[in-house]
Image (tube, helix red, strand yellow):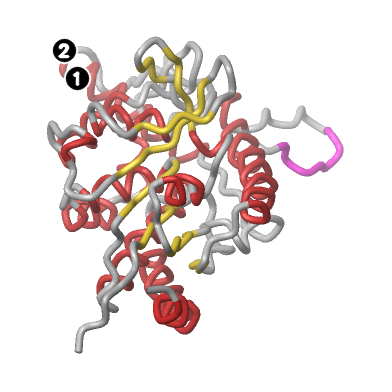
Amino acid sequence: MTRTLPRIGLALGSGVARGFAHIGVLRGLAARGIEADVVAGTSIGALVGAAHVAGKLDAFEDWALSLATRKFWRYLDPRLGGSLFGGQRLSERLAEHLGEVLVEDLPVPFTAVATDLISGHEVWLREGDLTEAVRASYALPGVFPPIEHHGRWLVDGALVNPVPISVCRAQEARIVIAVNLNADSFGRARVPSPAPEALAVIEDIEAGEDEAAGEDADKPRRRWLPRSLTRAPRAKAKAAPRRETPGMLSVVAASFDIVQDRLTRSRLAGEPPDVTIAPRLNNFGFLDFDRADEMIALGIAAVERAWPDLDEALSTLP
């Protein structure tokens, strides 16, 4: 006899590259016959959640598995201005995957969480263009530009609600499953140094653009991103040995890690979920986009570990 399940809410947390573990969590839940009635996501959680609800998870997983470090950096179009990256190439790729879909037309209620840059208020995006909602949710300040939405400037939702349990509760979910990507990361995860790859890719992109314009492709110009943004300056000759200063992106990633860890602990204490799924991602940095296969496997394993608690919760509530 098929068990009648209560209304299930799925809160997919933030975590940048670690968010690929969400794919494994969704696979693991589906294998157990668990489908969410409500999905809410923050940052990378909004991106994976949107792909899932829109029926595009297979294509998104294929794209994630195809990423190498250099390939990912090509999507970021470095720039000078209010952010390190424009993100237009990534947005175009996202639109290709999701298509022209409105949030309110999705088959399952979906919410992307963002932050109002001016007021600091939490913003729930539950209607309008799906791609725009996802872009606003992952617009990490200083890394990606804010997104203008109905007169508001929106940035990454992880600044206010890293694991959006409250959104699921507000939509009358009887059981809320929270996926916390940062449960065991703070203080143990390595902070990658993206500088060599980032700079190499920028040089390659510049060379390709020069070649298309009929210029000498063997002399790439570094007009977008100086080394000082991602790599510490070289020590002067005869200087005493010293530890290398972290590059700018490494500092941003580590700082964001701290903010998410502290805020997630606070929000989970005040708004505990019924079940927490916590992939063991302490060996993965925020920028390890080339390790999707490992993180997907860890997401599946996390569902297996959490299954006794989830099964008990499903059996308790009608």
Q: Position of residue 92 (x, y in %)?
A: 21, 29
Is 159 on the left or on the right of 31, as rendered?
A: right
Q: Residue at x 29, y 78 (%)?
A: 32
Residue 139 position, x and y percent, is 44, 29
Which residue is label 1 attached to? 211
Please provide percent x and percent y for residue 2: 21, 84
From which residue to which does the magenta span run? Answer: 239-245
Q: Which mark is residue 176?
A: none
* Mark 2 crowdedness (10 Å alpha carbons): few <14, some 14-19, many ≥20: few
Farthest residue, direction bottom: 1
Of the 4 image quadrants, the one containing the N terminus is: bottom left
Q: Is residue 109 left or right of residue 99?
A: right
Residue that appears at 36% across and 32% down: 125
Q: Residue beneath label 2, please? A: 214
Location of residue 77 by image quarter: top left
Residue at image x 37%, y 37%? 73
Q: How many numbered marks, from 0 up? A: 2
Q: Residues within 10 Å of mark 1 (few under 14, many from 20)?
A: some
